[in-house]
Image: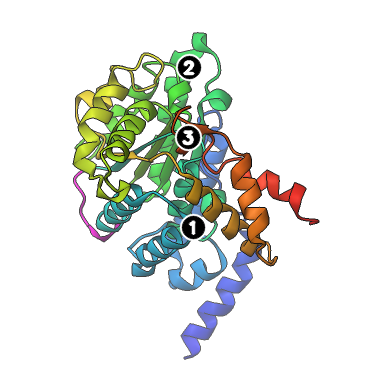
Amino acid sequence: MRPRRDALAALLALLPLLGPARAVEPISLGLALAGAAASALTGIISYPSLYCYFRECCLQHHDRRAAAGLQESLDRKLFGQHLASKVIVKAVKGFLNNTNPKKPLALSLHGWTGTGKNFVSKIVAESIYKRGLKSKYVHQFVATLHFPHADSVNLYKDQLQSWIRGNVSLCPRSLFIFDEMDKMHAGLIDSIKPFLDYYELLNGVSYRKAMFIFLSNAGAEKITEVTLDFWRKGKMREEIQLTDMQNALSVSVFNNKNSGFWHSTLIDRNLIDYFVPFLPLEYKHVKMCVRVEVEARGYAVDEDILTRIADEMTYFPREERIYSDKGCKTVYAKLDYYYDF
């Protein structure tokens, strides 16, 4: 027991000296060196599990609770998305259980605003790392924020490659989330093609355990078309299968000139594992969103208020008025008006 206590005492003495290891950013070599130093120090400590109790660590092996937590969160908080829930849970669980994947996991989430794409990517991040989107191993890119200028695409390509290379070098289980793919400049995302391919190593680094999630409104029209066709034929939306959507969705996104995936090699070379459709939300789903938010804030549910908020949303198509044109995106702000928070 004495050596363990000595090691614990030494570790506790070292911890205050350790600043948080920061993720590598393409514009800063200093951050890369700091992160590498912290990573090396972690490796030489005799009791890494104890170290990780105090400091966030890269996921080295799959914790089965992660998949269970992902399923539970989606069941409780995601509405009207039976396809997305099923596909994402199976894909993430299978990928994390695989100790020797042949390529990184690449998921492309498609649908109208407010249908749950960002929400799901947040839940996936939280199921793998406790700090979720705030984790230093989770990297989120927003097209209009990080890549705003069309004349700087070549610079963005170099930066993006450096960012991914540096972070995966530090943590093989890094998660990268690309939002607003429909607003990304064409050709930019192709710069990460080598990292999503089947290479065992690239310059000594393996990218096979990394995860990439792409979020886009592109393809939403095709998703609505299929969903509406089922409704008009008297079929339940839950009868829609991935096979009813995936091929048409990938072709639609590939040929969409307003999409960052326009004629992308990631699609052409079949490097996207799943195109995940998020169906347009109905009136009943809007009410479910409101109910969960009210309960999360600790207030009693008032059915009249739930109905009024759902009634205030606008729906399409114009004749049938079935689907909320903003999904659940604005219902949370409406709560502040009706409840005296």
- Image quadrant where residue 320 sits: top left
| Span shown in magenta | 96-102
| Dot 2 or dot 1, earlier in sequence | 1
Cα gap from disc 2 to disc 1, whole angstroms: 39 Å
Which residue in the protein does label 2 denote? 155
Q: Nearer the viewer, residue 109 or 63?
A: 109
Identify the residue at horizontal 50%, vertical 89% (top origin). Answer: 2
- Residue furthest to the bottom: 1
Q: Nearer the viewer, residue 71 or 79?
A: 79
Which residue in the protein does label 1 denote? 77
Identify the residue at horizontal 54%, vertical 35% (top origin). Answer: 326
Task: In the rendered view, tell whether residue 114 sits above or below residue 136.
Answer: above
Cα gap from disc 3 to disc 1, whole angstroms: 24 Å
User: Label 3 neighbourhood size at 10 Å, few (<14), some (14-19), many (20+)?
Assistant: few
The image position of residue 19, as x and y in percent, is: 62, 55
Element assignment for label 3: loop
